[in-house]
Amino acid sequence: MIDKLIISAVLGVVWFNGLFPDPPQPLTGRQLQVKAKEASKSAVCDKSKKQSKTLQQLCKRWGKDD
């Protein structure tokens, strides 16, 4: 009977630890800058269907062409 209690306690602890993983680490300053640049590029390229030729070339170079 004691062995069943020990096994269930161990399994309960293992299950509980796997159920709640560690929270993700906060982004560094450099990662936030890169994320903001990508969002800005996407916003510019998705903003309008009628884009100037220069803007179309920039979006193509950035890989944001449709």
Image (cartoon, helix red, strand yellow):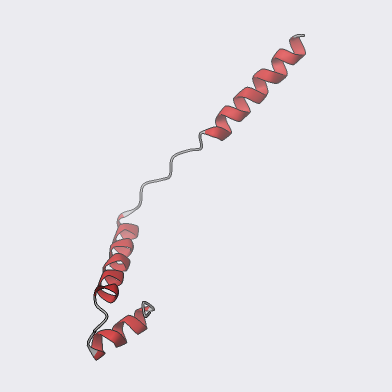
Image mark count: 0
Task: Report the quarter where the C terminus lies.
Answer: bottom left
Residue 39, image quadrant: bottom left
* Position in image of residue 9 (x %, y %): 65, 18
Residue 12, image quadrant: top right
Using residue 51 as the reference point, say whether residue 35 is left or right of it.
Answer: right
Q: Nearer the viewer, residue 54 or 29?
A: 54
Using residue 12 as the reference point, say whether residue 1 is left or right of it.
Answer: right
Q: Nearer the viewer, residue 1 or 46?
A: 46
* Position in image of residue 40 (x %, y %): 26, 68
- Residue 66 in the image: above or below residue 15: below
Please report the residue visible at 35 percent of the width from the left and 51 percent of the height from the top.
27
- Residue 32 in the image: above or below residue 50: above
* Position in image of residue 19 (x %, y %): 55, 33
Please report the residue visible at 25 percent of the width from the left and 84 percent of the height from the top.
55
Residue 11, image quadrant: top right
Name the outermost residue toward the bottom: 53
Using residue 6 as the reference point, say whether residue 61 is left or right of it.
Answer: left
- Residue 21 in the image: above or below residue 15: below
* Position in image of residue 23 (x %, y %): 44, 40
Name the outermost residue toward the front: 49
Task: Report the quarter where the N terminus lies.
Answer: top right
Name the outermost residue toward the top: 1
